[in-house]
Image: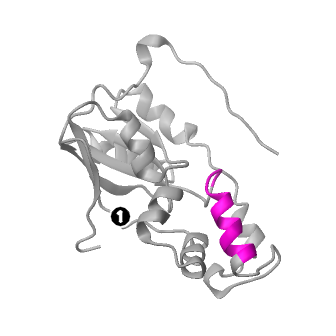
């Protein structure tokens, strides 16, 4: 089964990333799990390589079965984003799907902009289990999965955006900063 959300936006209100500049902050909103990407790799690791079934439990997952962890409902970020968009506080947005942060954030960055990503947000247990049982490198995990970063907001008003997200009941996190250049790099010192 698959679901789709379709909407429309006035051409004058399209956020295409062209307003992004070095120094803008990247604020993240968490995912609930795999969302809709990485299931081929997850199935290969969990069911074929490790021999688990959907009803099996693993200590890393806590109370969830493997199936429950894999099928966490994909979040919609509209409720959280609407007030930020109405107040013109967003320079760019990236929904982190297949390709992870590197494959999705790069799509919205204008020429001459890159990013330093500072991972430190909570990673859902399902990703830890897949990495451990599959012996998968951190680079491949970042490429295949969102690793808990479901949606990224690029803004020059990070404090206000963070405050509004907190007021909306979210747990936003600092995901990095926009830099000069054209690459997306991970910086894990102190994380």
* Nearest to the observer: residue 51 or residue 93: 51
Residue at left offset 59%, top offset 19%: 8
* Nearest to the observer: residue 137 or residue 65: 137
Q: Is residue 64 visible?
A: no
Q: Is residue 2 left or right of residue 157?
A: right
Q: Which range of residues does the magenta coloring cover?
A: 35-48
Can you say whether 160 is above or below 122 in the image?
above
Residue 94 magenta: no
Res 65 quadrant in image: bottom right
Q: How many marks?
A: 1
Q: Position of residue 30 (x, y in %)?
A: 50, 56
Can you say whether 147 is above or below 113 in the image?
below
Q: Is residue 111 left or right of residue 44?
A: left
Which residue matches tag 1? 119
Badge 1 marks a residue whose secondary structure is: loop
Q: Is residue 35 visible?
A: yes
Q: Position of residue 6 (x, y in %)?
A: 66, 26
Q: Is residue 70 left or right of residue 123?
A: right
Residue at left offset 73%, top offset 60%: 71
Q: Position of residue 141 (x, y in %)?
A: 49, 65
Q: Quadrant of the N terminus?
A: top right
* Nearest to the observer: residue 161 or residue 182: 182
Q: Quadrant of the C terminus?
A: bottom left
* Nearest to the observer: residue 52 or residue 82: 52
Q: Position of residue 3 (x, y in %)?
A: 75, 39
Residue at left offset 61%, top offset 43%: 76
Residue 44 magenta: yes
Residue at left offset 43%, top offset 17%: 13
């Amino acid at each position: 089964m698959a679901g789709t959300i379709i909407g429309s936006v006035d051409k004058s209100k399209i956020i295409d990333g062209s307003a992004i500049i070095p120094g803008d902050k990247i604020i993240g909103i968490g995912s609930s799990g795999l969302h809709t990407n990485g299931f081929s790799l997850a199935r290969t690791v969990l069911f074929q390589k490790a021999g688990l079934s959907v009803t099996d439990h693993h200590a890393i997952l806590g109370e969830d079965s493997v199936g429950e962890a894999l099928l966490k409902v994909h979040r919609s970020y509209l409720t959280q984003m609407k007030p930020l968009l109405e107040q013109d506080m967003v320079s760019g947005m990236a929904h982190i799907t297949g390709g992870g942060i590197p494959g999705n954030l790069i799509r919205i960055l204008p020429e001459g902009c890159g990013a330093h990503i500072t991972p430190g947000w909570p990673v859902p247990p399902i990703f830890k289990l897949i990495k451990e049982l599959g012996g998968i490198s951190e680079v491949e995990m970042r490429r295949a999965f969102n690793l808990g970063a479901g949606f990224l907001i690029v803004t020059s008003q990070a404090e206000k955006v963070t405050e509004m997200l907190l007021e909306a009941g979210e747990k936003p996190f600092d995901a990095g900063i926009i830099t000069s250049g054209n690459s997306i790099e991970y910086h894990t010192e102190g994380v």
